[in-house]
Amino acid sequence: MVEKLTLVFLSMDFIFAATGGLILAFALMSETEMRAAPSTDTVAQHLLLSQCPLTAGIVNAIFIFVTFLVSLPALFIPTNKAWLRLQGWLLVFCSLFTLILGLTIWFETLKTRSNLESMWAKEKPLAQSLLQQKFECCGYLNSTSPPFVQDSTCSNSLVAAQRQGCIGPFSDYANSFLDIVFTALFGCVGIDVLLLLCTAMLLKHRQELERYKHIDEKNGIGGL
């Protein structure tokens, strides 16, 4: 029983640490990618990543790693329950932190079109042109509102008028991309909760062992 509980706790602990690694890798790779020159394949992703709380994600990953390090003495010093309690409170903090990040991105999906419209207006003609080429569209709402950027996709007014505005395909892409991000974060929260339950069970089990040990000592049997 003890060995199984410890193994489950240890397995969940390493999975928890792995979620911190994934969050950190995503944030660092995203920041690196955003510093690169945009292309047709990456321009939409760059714009969406700029709206994600990447710095907060790095901070969250650091807290996850700290919580994992706290779990090591909690695991290997069974007589000291303070480490397990500290890990439990840190897990609560990490899960709330990750949940807030996921909810922040989820709220962005509820106002995708208005966000993208202001984003489009702020971008230079080069980025707008790359978006037109990626989604084979002209202008944001349509070719005249706002005016399209002349490029290989929208070579003239006649061609542009026959193409749809970028609002539809761009918002569909944004929703799909952000859905993956916040769903992954919610999945990390689920792992946090499972590890928190394992921590509570392990703490409870150690408290029971200590109680039985005290009872045996009072009865003159000695600790088992």
Image (tube, rainbow, N blue to C red):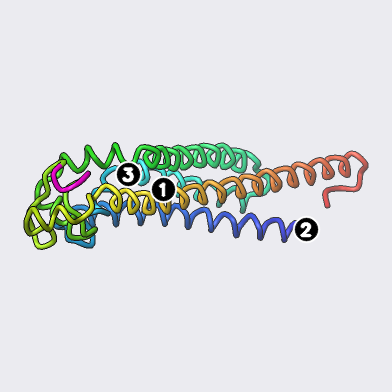
- Which is more toward the observer, 172 or 52? 172
Q: Which mark is residue 156?
A: none
Q: Position of residue 43 (x, y in %)?
A: 21, 55
Judge the density around disc 2: few (<14), some (14-19), many (≥20) Cα neighbours within 10 Å: few
> On the image, which quarter does residue 38 sit in?
bottom left
Q: Position of residue 24 (x, y in %)?
A: 37, 52
* The N terminus, quarter of image: bottom right
> Which type of secondary structure does the marked residue at label 1 adopt?
helix
Magenta stretch bounds: 140-144
Sequence-first disc among 1 and 2: 2
Circles 1 and 2: CB atoms closer than 8 Å: no
The residue drawn where x is 19% and y is 46% is: 142
Q: Which residue is mark 1?
A: 61
Of the residues shown, which amino acid type is indicated by label 2?
A: Met
In the image, is residue 73 part of the stretch drawn in magenta? no
Q: Which residue is mark 2?
A: 1
Numbered disc in front, either 1 or 2: 1
Horizontal side, residue 133 vs residue 157: left or right: right
Of the residues shown, which amino acid type is indicated by label 3?
A: Cys
- Distance from disc 3 to disc 2, alpha carbons, whole Å, reads 43 Å
Sequence-first disc among 3 and 2: 2
Of the residues shown, which amino acid type is indicated by label 1?
A: Ala
Numbered disc in front, either 3 or 2: 3
> Which type of secondary structure does the marked residue at label 2 adopt?
loop
In the image, is residue 143 part of the stretch drawn in magenta? yes
Q: Position of residue 33 (x, y in %)?
A: 23, 57
- Which is more toward the observer, 32 or 221? 32
- Which is more toward the observer, 158 or 45? 158
- Distance from disc 1 to disc 2, alpha carbons, whole Å, reads 32 Å
Q: Which residue is mark 3?
A: 52
